[in-house]
Amino acid sequence: MPRNKAQFQKGFSLNEFIKQYGTEDQCFDALYLITQDKKGISAMKLRRHLGVSYNAAWRMKHKLMQVMMERDAQKELSGFIELDDAYLGGERTGCKRGCGAADKTPFVAAVETTSEGCPMRIKLSVI
């Protein structure tokens, strides 16, 4: 079976990668791809954008996500904080609706807002 040419393109050499992503601003633009997609970016899509191998894109994505998680864990919310509880889980036909439905995960969301009411940071905790 032939390989998908778009999926297995030649990646950058280290020198080419540093030329394109070697500064803080350039790195921020790669980071932008990871944070702006609603469901997150796949390693395959990141690989296509950056022109690196799949394994390099996967490692880069996971290392950046780990650093972002560790940074957020160290910072506490402050100022005006709004709290709400919610349930996460898909709908099923023919089953009980609402918060008592099976396979729903309850969690609490705490949102730090500015004085104008704009959200700044959020913390989620499973109950």
Image (spheres, rainbow, N blue to C red):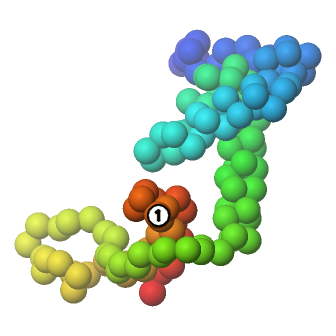
Q: Amino acid at mark 1?
A: Ser
Give percent across and percent down for residue 38: 43, 44
- Can you name the residue that lies furthest to the left here? 94
Position in image of residue 16 (x %, y %): 85, 14
Bin the neighbour count of mark 1 within 10 Å (Cα to Cα): few under 14, some 14-19, many 20 and up: few
The structure residue drawn at horizontal position 68% and vertical position 23%, both measured from the top left corner, is 50
User: Compared with residue 23, is residue 111 higher up or lower down, i.e. above or below?
Assistant: below
Residue at image point 75% right, 44% down: 59
Quarter of the figure with the N terminus:
top right
- Is 71 left, or right, of 48 in this rendering? right
Nearer to the camera, 112 or 14? 112
Q: Give the quadrant of residue 25.
A: top right
Which quadrant would residue 15 be assigned to in this image? top right
Give 7 or 57, whichever is nearer the viewer.
57
| Residue 77 image position (x, y, % from top left) | 59, 73
Total numbered labels:
1
One can see residue 103 in this view: yes
The image quadrant that residue 101 belongs to is bottom left
**Would residue 83 be found to the left or right of residue 40 on screen?**
left
- Relative image position of residue 83 (x, y in whole percent): 40, 79
At 51% from the left and 40% from the top, the residue drawn is: 36
Looking at this view, is 13 or 18 the one in front? 18
Left or right relative to 87: residue 17: right
Residue position for label 1: 115
Q: Residue at x 71, y 34 (%)?
A: 28
Q: Spot the residue most to the right.
A: 15
* Dot 1: element: loop
